Each structure stands twice: as C-alpha cells, then as structure tokens.
Image (cartoon, helix red, strand yellow):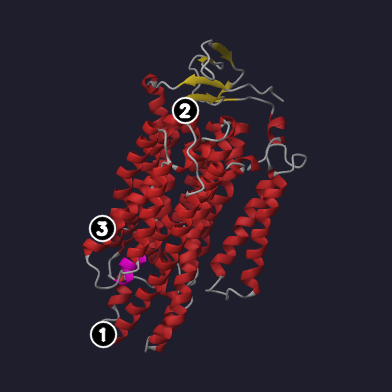
C-alpha cells in the first residue's frame, strides 16, 4: 500500500486561478446541469408518461423515485471510492452511466423499462452530483468554497427550474421521450471537457490494494436499506395500507438496516475505511447541518413535485404552462444563493443565512395552504419567490458548516454524506407528500357524486389523472367538477400543512449549529495536477507560522 502523504497547505489566492482552473470549473458546471435537469424535468411530464405507457396508478411515484433512490444509495460509495480511485475516472464513469440510462429511458416501451432506465440514470447522476462538489472543494479553501459552490448550485438550480418547463414543452409539442434523449449531446459535450481538462492528483497504488479499501459491506447494506424504505413509502397508503405487513416489514427492515450500517461503520475490524465514519457526526455543528440539509431537501422536493400538481389540476394549466408557472422558484433561488455564498465567504458566518432560509421556507408553506381555484397569479408567484429565497439561502450554507469543524482529510466523505442526506431528503420529499395526498384523496373521494370518477381518483389515481385535459373533460358536469376540484384543493392543503411541521423542525435543528471559524488555507492531496509531471510542490503556511515548508507529494496525475 502506498504511504499516506500529509496534505499540502496553500494560502487562499483566488486571483491566481488560471485558465485550467476555469476550464475544469466550466466542465463541472456543464456536468452538474445534466443531473439537475433530470431530477425536475419529469415532474410536468409524469402524468402523460404514466398514461402513455399504461402504468399502474402507483407507477408514477416509481418513475420519479427510481432515479432518486439509486442516486441516494450510491452517493456514499462514490464519496469513499473517490479517495481510493481518484476523482477523474469516477466522474467520467458516472457521466457515461447517466448517458446510458438516458438512452434506455428514452427508448422505453413499457413502464418497467422506463423505471430501469431511470435507475441507471440515478446511479450516474448521484455520482455526478457528489464528485462535482468534491472536486470544487479540492480546488479552493473552505472560506472560498461557498462562492464557487454557489455558482455550481446556481447552475444546478437553474437547470432544476427549467426542467419542468422543458418537460412540459417536450411532452406537449414533441414527445416526452426527448426529455431523455436531449441528455445525450449534453453528456457528450461534458465528456469531451472532462477528458481534456479534468486532470487532478490522486494517490496511486496497486489495484489489489485499492479494491481492498472499498467498503463493500457497508455500501451493500446501505443500498438494500434505502431500497427497502422506499418500497414501503411507495406502497404505503396506495397499494397497501400503512398498517399492512407489506408496508411495515420493508420499512422496519430498512430503518433497522440504517442502524446496522452505522454500527458496522464504527467497528474498525470490520471496515478498513468507513464510507460514513461516525466522527462526521461527533460535533453539534456538523450534525445539525446534516439534519438541516435533509429537511431542506425534503421541503424542496415537496414544492417541485406538488406545485405542478396544483397548477395542472386546480388551475387547469398545460404541462408547458405548469413549468412556466414554476419558474419563480428557479429564478428566485439564484440571487439568494449567490448572495448567501458570497456573504459566507466575506463574513465567515453561515448561521444568519440558515435561520433566515428555513424561516422563509416555513412561512411559504403556510401561505401555500391558502391556494385554491380562485388564487391570483400574483399570490402564487409571490409565495414562490419567498420560498425560493429561503431555498437559495440554505443552498450554499449547509456544506461549509458541515466541513468547518472537520479535518480537511474528511472533506470527500463529508461531502458525500451531505449529498446522501440531500438526495435521501429529496426522495422523502416526493414520497411523504404523495402518501399524504393519496390518503387524503381516499378519505375525501366520497364527496364526489359520480361513482365512476371515485374509482378513477382513489389509490393514486388523482395524481396520475391531474391534467388540463382531464379537468376540462368534466366541464359537461359542472357540479361534479367542482367536487373534484374541492378534493384536489383539500388534499393539497393537508400536504402543505404537514410541510409546515417539517419547516418548524428545521428551525429547531438550526439552533444546534454553532459558528465555527472557516479555514483560509487549502489542504489536499487531490488538487489540480501540474501539467508537466506527476509531482506537486507547494509552499505552505501552517497555523500562522512564519517558516514555510516545501512539501513534495508522491501523488500521481489522473
């Protein structure tokens, strides 16, 4: 095994970033856009896809969550193996997997093939998300990271916001298949840039030694546990009652698996290099920021998947119009994410932004409970901007807070854990409101006089049928249509009310976080590689000492 080399320390010098740094940064931004688009592009097209492929009324959830479940399950593995095999090869592999999954999804002839393609996309997309953020953290010191991560996150947020619009346009004017096919040229461009410019350091060793460092046991258990929990969340309240064995058994086994995973990760004799070592959670600031990350992701997913449902069912918007109506969320996130990222870098403080962010999101959910068929455009635009401001403030402030108390050597696995919780939160952000919405519809469906419509709306049917066409088909029976709209409004109101509780919990979690000074020196073995060779020599200033030490590493170039 190669001898570990202490990371080098370099004083932050933002002005010294040359063209290679910016070329790498551009490649990472384009790569990040890929996965962001695919998370949200499906939201406005989902009812059409479900009907076109004759999927079951519960299949719509799996088309969305199959991407998220594989994404979340594999992210910790990417984080650990990035330290083992290096960043470059894994980033290229993840992008290739994403492209393959896109091709399979676009060519899907049935709902199961589409779900399989989305799962492959998720494996690649999860890796893209984590590796992009890890590489940015390798290139700049902690104090500077919020600014640069802010640009990446803004690219991500713009793509997330444009996703529903693009999905609506493709579905309405071409075919939903192009929401997947359009990824292929973007992936091709990203791969070219990655091959040309992404050359970073890594510690070379024999393959046999490298493979022994991979935490196969922990990751296998984590993947199985995540899938079990998601199965329970998908079935509960729709295909099976929450009290049924079919729902409770996988839920209990999945949660127990998560506990077992943490136990295994804490036993050094079982795991050589843990994927998620417990030291990441040993301080209140990192622990609280991990929790805030999860809650933020839950609430963001909640909005992205259930505002379009309101637009298409209650306001009778087309898929394209629904995507356009969601733009205030995407547009609103951008300036606040930039302001928060720059503010943290300048002030060295993240807590004020976190408190303001979670407070604004919670208030927004309260305002969403008042949405109905008579709500004005100004109302739902204004409330979205308020919520987007909260999301933007949190977007760039949780990861720096997590990394601040931790050693720089743990930044890759800390970033992967942060990404895992963010993606896991997004999964719950779809599944929890879906379960609440479906259960509430089932309870209210008897208020609809038409018996045949009751059968259509129950057990997930209300979501699958939410469209302008379906609602306009009820114009001939206005009284019944009014009853159906009432069911949608009441069911959505309950989902927003439960979201308020999550927001209040997030505010309490934010109280746990402390303000920790952020490092202004970069310490890493995985920075930008020298063009001429495989060694790097950097001057370092450590702990305010005047004496500079020259450190030559044995790192190799990817």
User: Which mark identifies residue 319?
Assistant: none
- Whether residue 118 is visible here, answered yes or no, is no
Instruction: Read off the residue under disc 2.
Output: 141
Which residue is rendered at x = 54% and y = 32% of the image?
87
Viewer-nearest of discs 1 and 3: 3
Q: Is residue 239 left or right of residue 22?
A: right
Instruction: Read off the residue under disc 1.
Output: 476
Q: Is residue 237 above or below residue 532?
A: below
- Cα separation, mark 2 vs mark 3, equals 37 Å
Quadrant for the N terminus, please.
top right
**Magenta residue check for 236:** no
The secondary element bearing badge 1 is classed as: loop
The secondary element bearing badge 2 is classed as: loop
The secondary element bearing badge 3 is classed as: helix
How many other residues sit within 10 Å of disc 2, few (<14), some (14-19) or many (≥20)?
many
Magenta highlight: main SS: helix
């Amino acid at each position: 095994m190669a001898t570990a080399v202490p990371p080098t320390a370099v004083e932050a010098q933002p002005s010294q970033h040359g063209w290679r740094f910016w070329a790498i940064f551009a490649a990472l931004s384009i790569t990040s856009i890929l996965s962001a688009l695919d998370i949200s592009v499906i939201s406005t097209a989902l009812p059409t896809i479900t009907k076109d492929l004759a999927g079951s009324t519960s299949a719509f959830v799996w088309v969305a969550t199959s991407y998220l479940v594989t994404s979340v399950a594999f992210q910790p593995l990417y984080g650990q193996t990035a330290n083992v095999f290096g960043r470059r090869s894994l980033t290229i592999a993840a992008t290739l997997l994403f492209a393959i999954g896109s091709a399979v999804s676009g060519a899907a002839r049935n709902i199961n093939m589409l779900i399989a393609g989305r799962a492959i996309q998720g494996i690649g997309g999860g890796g893209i998300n984590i590796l992009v953020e890890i590489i940015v953290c390798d290139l700049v010191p902690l104090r500077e990271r919020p600014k640069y991560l802010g640009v990446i996150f803004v690219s991500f947020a713009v793509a997330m916001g444009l996703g529903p619009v693009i999905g609506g346009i493709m579905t309405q004017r071409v075919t939903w298949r192009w929401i997947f096919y359009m990824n292929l040229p973007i992936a091709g461009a990203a791969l070219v840039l990655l091959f040309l410019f992404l050359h970073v350091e890594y510690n070379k060793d024999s393959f046999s030694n490298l493979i022994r460092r991979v935490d196969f046991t922990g990751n296998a258990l984590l993947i199985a546990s995540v899938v079990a929990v998601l199965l329970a969340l998908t079935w509960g309240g729709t295909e099976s009652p929450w009290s049924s064995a079919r729902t409770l058994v996988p839920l209990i086994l999945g949660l127990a698996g998560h506990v077992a995973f943490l136990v295994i990760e804490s036993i050094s004799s079982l795991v050589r290099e843990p994927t998620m070592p417990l030291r990441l959670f040993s301080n209140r600031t990192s622990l609280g920021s991990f929790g805030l990350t999860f809650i933020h992701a839950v609430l963001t997913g909640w909005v992205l998947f259930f505002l379009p449902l309101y637009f298409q069912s209650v306001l009778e918007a087309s898929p394209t119009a629904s995507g356009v109506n969601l733009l205030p969320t995407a547009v609103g996130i951008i300036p606040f994410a930039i302001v928060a990222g720059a503010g943290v870098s300048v002030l060295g403080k993240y807590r004020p932004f976190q408190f303001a962010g979670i407070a604004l999101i919670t208030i927004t959910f309260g305002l969403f409970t008042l949405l109905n068929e008579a709500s004005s455009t100004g109302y739902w635009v204004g409330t979205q901007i308020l919520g987007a401001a909260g999301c933007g403030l949190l977007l760039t402030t949780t990861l720096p807070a997590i990394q601040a108390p931790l050693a720089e050597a743990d930044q890759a696995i800390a970033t992967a854990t942060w990404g895992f919780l963010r993606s896991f939160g997004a999964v719950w952000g779809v599944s929890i409101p879906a379960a609440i919405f479906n259960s509430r519809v089932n309870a209210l469906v008897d208020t609809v006089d038409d018996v045949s419509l009751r059968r259509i709306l129950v057990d997930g049917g209300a979501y699958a049928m939410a469209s302008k066409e379906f609602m306009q088909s009820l114009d001939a029976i206005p009284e019944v249509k009014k009853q159906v709209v009432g069911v949608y409004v009441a069911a959505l109101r309950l989902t927003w009310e439960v979201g308020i509780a999550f927001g209040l919990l997030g505010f309490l979690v934010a109280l746990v976080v402390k303000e920790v000074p952020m490092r202004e020196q970069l310490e890493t073995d995985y920075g930008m590689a020298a063009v001429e060779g495989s060694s790097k020599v950097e001057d370092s200033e450590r702990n305010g000492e005047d004496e500079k030490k020259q450190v030559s590493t044995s790192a190799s170039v990817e």
